[in-house]
Image: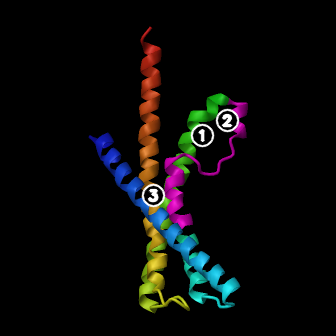
Amino acid sequence: MFGKILDVLDKVLSFFEEWTLFLTVFVALISLFVNVFLRYVFNYTLAWSEELVREVIIYTTLIGCSAAVKNRSMIKIDASVQLLPKLKVPLTFFSNFVTLIFSLIVLYFGWKMALLQVQTEQKTIILQIPLVYIFSILPLMGAMMFIRTIQLFHQDIADLRGKSSEKATP
């Protein structure tokens, strides 16, 4: 039952990550292309395109953290695992646990930062986007990383059970 819920969440999060990342990067590339074209052909620049690209970089970095957790491509130091292969399982669980704690911290403080932006009603300089939209990506990222890390824990435990049952049957 829990595995099925995690599978549904995986499909929903994967769809969200892939499409929003695709669309935001596509829009940023188009605006940058138009800006470069205008700059070199007409000697005119669009100030808003650079701000848009900056916001897209922030968005893609934070939402990309969830995809990185899913693909197990977070930055790690694996020299100790290569030297002592028996430490792979405990270090993997420790790494996932630290990621879980980090995601909860980002969720909590990101929520507080977003609430602060609601109170101050700050906006970006050129596009006048309320900063609450940008800061609300933090708790979203924390929640998505939390779910992805729980999925990794579930997958690792299932793999360990599968390996232990393979050893038990001759």
- Mark-to-mark CA distance, 2 and 3: 31 Å
Q: Nearer the viewer, residue 104 or 3?
A: 3
Identify the mark nearer the N-term, 1 or 2: 2
**Rendered-image quadrant of the C terminus:** top left
Q: Relative to 137, does residue 98 appear above or below in the rendering? A: above
Are the residues flagged by discs 1 and 2 in contact, CB closer than 8 Å?
A: yes
State the SS at label 3: helix
Q: CB atoms at circles 1 and 3 under 8 Å apart? A: no
Percent x, y of residue 147: 41, 53
Instruction: Give the residue at mark 1.
Output: 91
- Res 108 visible: no
Task: Decide which of tag 2 and tag 3 comes sooner along the chain.
Answer: 3
Q: Residues within 10 Å of mark 3 (few under 14, many from 20)?
A: few
Report the mark closest to the observer, 2 or 3.
3
Q: Which residue is mark 3?
A: 18
Q: Which residues are magenta?
A: 60-84
Amino acid on which disc 3 is placed: Glu
Q: Look at the picture and state if 24 lies above or below 12.
A: below
Numbered disc 2: secondary structure: helix
Kindly identify the residue that appears in the image at 45 percent across and 57 percent down.
Answer: 18
**Image quadrant assignment for residue 89:** top right
Q: Amino acid at mark 1?
A: Leu
Badge 1 crowding class, 10 Å Cα cut-off, few under 14, some 14 to 19, many 20 or more, is some
Residue under pointer 2: 81
The secondary structure type at the circle numbered 1 is: helix
Residue shown at the point (46%, 91%) measured from the top left: 120
Say whether residue 101 is magenta: no
Tell whether 113 sits left or right of 88: left
What's the distance in space between the residues labelled 1 and 2, CA to CA? 8 Å
Query: Which of the two marks, 1 or 3, is nearer to us in this view?
Result: 3
